[in-house]
């Protein structure tokens, strides 16, 4: 429903002269029975006050307005408010217009449309509902007075405490305070105390470090052994050579794979996923805890799992040489990478080996030691490699995007962070990704064919304004994108291919990635833009993602000839999307904090960087070996530089030297504040 509203709203916004019902139907290619639904949706817009109907033509109100929304993100200097009206994009609010609003607050915003810009800019008028009663921030003492700087405010100014008990408080201490009274409720610790950063992130993002007693009691009552009664009615694949392939530090194993060659030379791929739904029943305390979390959260030295450890790492996890309950997807795939037949079965398996990505890649590379150690599995692994290549070629030929951007990995010596390195992805990672994508798509297609309600993993296409901005960024590098309202994913992949091997490859890849919208969960199917899939759902990670658990339940009911009824799929999808965003941001925040803390020991040192953004304030440079950005203030630029907004560059008047997006520079680290996530750089 919301998607049709968004399509109508977007269409009417482009036609200030208004459109008739027939014209709207024609533009959106709506006919037959859907036409009456279209008419109801148009009337809904009129009832909301978002549209007008005059002489059988529909118009969008073009005016500044007041809207209600939730503060969903804050950064030093600005933040974003997400309107309750899902037709609207997030509203950009500068810190000077934020007032006392903080992350999570429901606010009223006065906004004005900004022609040519994706986002509106607004001002918080009032706080309607405070999203949290407690605040996390740090204590400062200045001239004998106590001040508090909250984390979740875009303002960099500290507010004075009305009254503060200084017992045990030190300047710079991180504290939890009551928002109303500003009374210190808890001293979390000093920024450099061991583990304080993780504790702060857990408090800030209101993550759940502990499970309820009821959920733990339910877990204790679950047998750790597969019973004969559990196996009844299941396909028995315990004699198949099934393996798990994961990273060396993986804690839970929810997917395993097998391969066979059919008589017709087709592949028979088995993707066997832990049957978490057998143990976690709807409405149970375990289910409520899993829903509340929505996803597992992974920190460098700690995991906040969606399920208790005994389930996540033990009973459900597909450990080798142990009977495990699974849901198996069997896919017959031809040599062109086409799925020609599918089968879905509750099953029981016993994996023969736990393999790592590095071991599998060593086998691909012909490593004699690895081939000898796993000689019985080598033939199957090489067949899997061939199948993965077929699937990958087919996926890319249909227009799927293929990013290869390294993520930062922290390297410790003992308990001390020593360095930051790019995480390595090899062909073995790609193999598992191809198999999981194939299984996810197969499950979605099967359930859609059965007209079954489902939680989909959708990826909306990019917003035209973002694509226009991307065109301007790529043009100086000689990369052009077709001028069309709906750019295909394969056009973006072509740009990625053109950048491959160039010094600016990472920058260009990141800019293309930033132009894309986030993938989300939805009870409506609108396809996955990045994968170029019309039908897609998450199925393969039920230990760590709640939507996968829901899809498991729906699939099992469908296999029994039943329909899943009365499931609030829309609200589940929305909640899980928000929890996923929260988890991603929490993981990223902790990573940045630790990297900045490491960089604080390197003040005055020289680094290589690349210009990733700029404004009249200066240039934003990402340190190539550290994956974080810092600012070179414009006043610190040597020479007479002028900012050219049209070309997003700084030009030195006398020499004509240009500092533009993607320019590689050498910089000195002048200052870094891990708490405020700020870093000041200077050109070397």
Image (cartoon, helix red, strand yellow):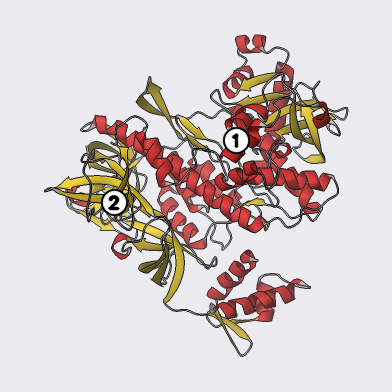
Residue 60 position (above or below residue 427): below
How far separated are the C-alphas under marks 2 and 1? 34 Å
Task: Judge by depth and name the residue closer to the eye, 457 or 384.
Answer: 457
Which residue occupies the extreme bottom position in the image?
A: 55
Task: Judge by depth and name the residue closer to the eye, 133 or 670.
Answer: 133
Which residue occupies the extreme right position in the image?
A: 263
Where residue 407 sits in the image (x, y, percent)? 46, 35
Residue 13 position (above or below residue 497): below
Residue at position x 43%, y 74% from top? 66
Image position of 493 (left or right of 683):
right
Task: Judge by depth and name the residue closer to the eye, 636 or 139.
Answer: 139
Residue density around tag 1, few if under 14, some if 14–19, many if 20 or more, within 10 Å: some
Where residue 565 sits in the image (x, y, percent)? 76, 56
Image position of 344 (left or right of 145):
right
How many marks are shown on the rendered structure? 2
Q: Quadrant of residue 411?
A: top left
Residue at position x 63%, y 29% from top? 253
Where residue 668 sits in the image (x, y, percent)? 23, 36
Where residue 263 sits in the image (x, y, percent)? 88, 27
* Mark 1 lies on residue: 216
Name the secondary structure under disc 2. loop
Q: Quadrant of residue 484?
A: bottom right
Q: Which mark is residue 39?
A: none
* Mark 2 lies on residue: 183
């Amino acid at each position: 429903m919301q998607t049709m509203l968004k399509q109508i709203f977007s269409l009417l916004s482009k036609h200030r002269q208004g459109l008739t019902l027939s014209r709207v139907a024609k533009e959106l290619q709506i006919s037959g029975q859907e036409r009456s639904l279209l008419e109801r949706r148009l009337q809904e817009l009129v009832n909301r006050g978002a549209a007008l109907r005059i002489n059988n033509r529909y118009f969008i109100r073009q005016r500044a307005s007041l809207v209600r929304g939730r503060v969903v993100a804050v950064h030093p200097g600005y933040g974003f408010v997400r309107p309750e009206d899902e037709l609207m994009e997030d509203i950009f609010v500068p810190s000077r217009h934020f007032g006392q609003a903080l992350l999570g607050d429901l606010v009223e915003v006065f906004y004005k449309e900004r022609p040519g810009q994706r986002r509106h800019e607004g001002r918080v008028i009032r706080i309607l509902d405070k999203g949290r009663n407690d605040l996390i921030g740090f204590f400062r003492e200045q001239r004998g007075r106590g001040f508090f700087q909250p984390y979740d405010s875009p303002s960099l100014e500290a507010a004075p405490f009305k009254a503060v008990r200084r017992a045990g408080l030190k300047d710079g201490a991180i504290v939890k305070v009551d928002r109303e009274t500003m009374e210190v409720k808890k001293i979390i610790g000093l920024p450099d105390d061991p583990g304080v950063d993780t504790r702060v992130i857990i408090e800030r993002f209101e993550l759940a470090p502990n499970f309820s007693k009821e959920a733990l009691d339910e877990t204790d009552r679950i047998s750790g052994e597969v019973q004969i009664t559990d196996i009844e009615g299941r396909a028995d694949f315990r004699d198949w050579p099934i393996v798990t392939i994961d990273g060396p530090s993986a804690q839970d194993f929810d997917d395993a794979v097998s391969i066979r060659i059919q008589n017709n030379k087709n592949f028979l791929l088995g993707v066997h996923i832990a049957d978490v739904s057998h143990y976690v029943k709807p409405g149970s305390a375990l289910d409520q805890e899993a829903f509340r979390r929505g996803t597992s959260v992974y920190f460098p030295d700690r995991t906040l799992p969606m399920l208790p450890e005994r389930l996540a790492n033990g009973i459900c996890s597909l450990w080798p040489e142990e009977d495990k309950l699974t849901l198996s997807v069997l896919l017959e795939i031809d040599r062109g990478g086409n799925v020609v037949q599918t089968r879905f079965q509750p099953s029981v398996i016993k994996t023969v080996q736990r393999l790592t990505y590095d071991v599998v890649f060593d086998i691909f590379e012909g490593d004699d030691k690895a081939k000898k150690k796993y000689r019985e599995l080598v033939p199957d692994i090489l067949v899997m490699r061939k199948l993965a290549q077929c699937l990958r070629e087919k996926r890319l030929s249909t227009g799927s995007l293929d990013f290869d951007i390294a993520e930062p990995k922290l390297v410790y010596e003992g308990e001390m962070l020593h360095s930051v390195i790019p995480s390595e992805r090899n062909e073995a990672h790609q193999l598992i990704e191809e198999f999981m994508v194939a299984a996810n798509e197969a499950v979605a297609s099967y359930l859609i064919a059965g007209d079954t309600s489902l939680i989909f993993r959708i990826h909306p296409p990019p917003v035209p304004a973002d694509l226009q901005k991307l065109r301007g960024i790529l043009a100086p590098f000689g990369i052009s994108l077709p001028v069309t309202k709906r750019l295909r994913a394969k056009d973006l992949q072509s740009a990625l291919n053109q950048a491959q091997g160039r010094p600016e490859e990472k920058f260009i890849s990141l800019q293309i990635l930033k132009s894309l919208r986030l993938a989300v969960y939805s009870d409506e199917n609108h396809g996955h833009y990045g994968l170029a899939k019309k039908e897609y759902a998450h199925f393969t990670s039920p230990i760590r993602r709640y939507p996968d658990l829901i899809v498991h339940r729906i699939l099992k009911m469908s296999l029994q000839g039943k329909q899943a009824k009365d499931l609030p799929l829309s609200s589940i999808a929305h909640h899980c999307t928000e929890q996923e965003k929260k988890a991603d941001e929490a993981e990223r925040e902790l990573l940045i904090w630790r990297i900045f803390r490491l960089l604080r020991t390197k003040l005055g040192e020289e680094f290589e960087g690349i210009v990733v953004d700029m404004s009249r304030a200066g240039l934003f440079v990402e340190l190539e070996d550290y994956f974080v950005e810092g600012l070179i203030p414009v006043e610190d630029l040597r020479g007479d530089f002028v900012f050219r907004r049209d070309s997003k560059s700084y030009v030195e008047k006398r020499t004509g030297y240009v500092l533009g997006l993607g320019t590689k520079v050498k910089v000195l680290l002048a200052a870094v504040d891990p708490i405020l996530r700020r870093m000041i750089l200077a050109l070397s």
